[in-house]
């Protein structure tokens, strides 16, 4: 099936009389050497005009839950700290961008977008787009209250895999995609989340299967079998040649509320006199009423969450102060048991034949890697040579959105491509470009089909009002890419 090309790109930058570069409009690209397509410009304009009410009280509660403040013996989520940082940055950006208050806990903010290399558009500051579904569900509850629940969350079904399947027509991949993710996970003897990480890691790594998600899952299971719920995995010497993975295990540490309510911290305060771990001293916090001062599970830091008197700048003054390790966790017997457990898990990891496991994964994902090889050959066959201008003589490719990728230098790092990095960059450039073209094409048709696009989610869209099937059919006919857009719960 032949894909229709979208219009050529336009330069959003103009020249002043003094020869200095200035911006032609409010749309700013991440890389100033890149071009923004007309479709991206229209999509950003349509989304930037939206005003979204969000519940900052629910966002704060979500942040506290993510930080690991849970009861003793509850399993600790390994990804909670990463999500905590994402949510903290998102709330801070949303508070700074909010214009007015529509209720006690409801703020209004207008999303601001920037274009990326592949043609996707991303919210500045991350905001709701950079977080996960649980946070979106929490903060957009205010929107549902204000608007009677007229909120729809649309998602492209298996967008990357479907685009690869349509572009290549590879029948083994089509059969692979018909199998449910739960069935794949059962066959690989893992959970569904690990299978999805393996699948998409293979796609965006240029067809090279990664065993890291499976190894991490193995370590987590081994630790939980011994009653340890907090686990962190990192690479030893990540900048050198060694790629040996090491394991760091901590005991699950319960949370404790050290301060609350009307306590005003104007200087160094001696808190938690009745705490079993003894008193702790924190840095002075000025001009704020703390909602609570808590100890985060699994870390040696103390998080102070507080709000200003007007209740608007919720997270602008959120701080992290180091907390001394309690003496009870320096018990030699406990440390000796932990060290023995680390050695035991490391021995099990060495006995496991990960090379054989990697070979098995490579055979299982052969339909995916085979389709990626075919797609890469098609992409490189369409490469062109720049004939004029400052990039004369450089080979480049274009994706469906009209974006340009030069094949000699990486656009972000500025370093020459290796064969593998060129392959995975070109594949992501093509697949994400098609995904962005679909979402942007739906976004710009909002007025025509009487729905309001609110948030771009890369492979989905949150709207006010339903998207009619006629709009989807028109986009399919215009782009020549069959896809399925389904509504999902927030």
Image (spheres, rainbow, N blue to C red):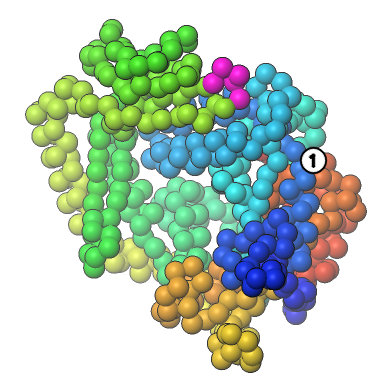
Residue 109 in picture, x, y percent from top left: 68, 37
The residue singled out by tag 1 in the image is 464
Q: Where residue 483 sits in the image (x, y, percent)? A: 73, 62
Q: Residue at x 64, y 27 (%)?
A: 55
* Residue at point 70%, 33% (across, down): 99
Q: In this rendered view, identify the residue nearer to me: 206 or 224.
A: 206
Q: Residue at x 69, y 57 (%)?
A: 27
Q: In this view, does 350 lie above or below 259?
A: below
Q: Is mark 1 on a helix, strand or loop?
A: strand
Residue 392 visible in the displayed image: yes
Residue 153 in view, yes or no = no
Asked if residue 45 lies left or right of residue 119, the reply is right
> How would you rate the neighbour count of disc 1 (Cα within 10 Å): few for under 14, some for 14-19, many for 20 or more?
many
Q: Which of the image's four quarters has the N terminus? A: bottom right
| Part of the protein shown in magenta | 308-312
Q: Main secondary structure of the magenta part?
A: loop
> What residue do we see at 46% from left, 24% from top?
305
Quarter of the image for residue 77 reads: top left
View extreme (front): residue = 18
Image coordinates for residue 444, horizontal then vertical, percent? 81, 57
* Depicted 85 relative to depicted 355: above or below: above
């Amino acid at each position: 099936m032949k894909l229709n090309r979208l219009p050529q790109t336009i330069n959003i930058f103009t020249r002043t009389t003094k020869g200095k570069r200035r911006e032609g409009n409010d749309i700013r690209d991440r890389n100033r050497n890149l071009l923004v397509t007309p479709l991206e410009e229209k999509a950003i304009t349509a989304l930037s005009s939206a005003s979204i009410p969000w519940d900052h009280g629910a966002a704060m509660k979500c942040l506290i839950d993510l930080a690991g403040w849970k009861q003793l013996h509850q399993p600790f989520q390994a990804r909670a700290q990463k999500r905590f940082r994402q949510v903290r940055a998102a709330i801070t950006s949303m508070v700074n961008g909010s214009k007015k208050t529509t209720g006690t806990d409801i703020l209004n903010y207008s999303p601001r977008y920037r274009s990326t290399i592949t043609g996707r558009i991303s919210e500045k500051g991350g905001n709701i787009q950079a977080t996960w579904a649980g946070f979106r569900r929490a903060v957009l509850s205010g929107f549902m209250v204000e608007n009677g629940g007229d909120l729809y969350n649309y998602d492209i079904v298996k967008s990357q895999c479907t685009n690869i399947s349509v572009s290549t027509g590879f029948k083994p991949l089509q059969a692979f995609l018909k199998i449910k993710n739960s069935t794949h996970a059962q066959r690989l003897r893992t959970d569904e989340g690990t299978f999805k990480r393996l699948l998409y890691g293979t796609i965006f790594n240029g067809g090279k299967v990664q065993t890291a998600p499976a190894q991490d899952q193995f370590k987590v299971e081994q630790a939980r079998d011994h009653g340890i719920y907090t686990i962190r995995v990192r690479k030893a010497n990540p900048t050198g040649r060694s790629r040996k993975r090491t394991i760091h295990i901590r005991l699950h540490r319960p949370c404790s509320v050290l301060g609350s309510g009307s306590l005003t911290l104007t200087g160094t305060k001696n808190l938690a006199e009745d705490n079993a771990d003894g008193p702790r001293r924190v840095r002075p916090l000025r001009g704020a009423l703390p909602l609570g001062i808590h100890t985060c599970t699994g870390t040696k830091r103390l998080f102070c969450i507080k709000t200003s008197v007007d209740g608007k700048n919720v997270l602008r003054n959120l701080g992290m102060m180091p907390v001394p390790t309690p003496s009870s966790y320096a018990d030699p017997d406990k440390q000796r048991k932990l060290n023995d457990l680390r050695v035991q898990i490391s021995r099990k990891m060495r006995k496991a034949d990960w090379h054989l496991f990697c070979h098995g994964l490579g055979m299982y994902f052969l339909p995916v890697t085979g389709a990626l090889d075919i797609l890469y050959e098609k992409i490189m066959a369409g490469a062109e040579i720049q004939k004029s201008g400052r990039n004369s003589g450089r080979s480049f490719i274009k994706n469906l959105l009209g974006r340009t990728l030069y094949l000699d230098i990486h656009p972000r790092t500025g370093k020459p491509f290796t064969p593998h990095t060129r392959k995975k960059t070109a594949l992501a450039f093509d697949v994400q470009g098609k995904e962005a073209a679909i979402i942007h094409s739906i976004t710009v048709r909002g007025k025509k089909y009487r729905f309001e696009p609110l948030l771009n989610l890369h492979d989905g869209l949150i709207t006010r009002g339903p998207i009619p099937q006629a709009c989807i059919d028109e986009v399919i006919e215009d782009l020549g890419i069959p896809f399925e857009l389904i509504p999902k719960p927030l």
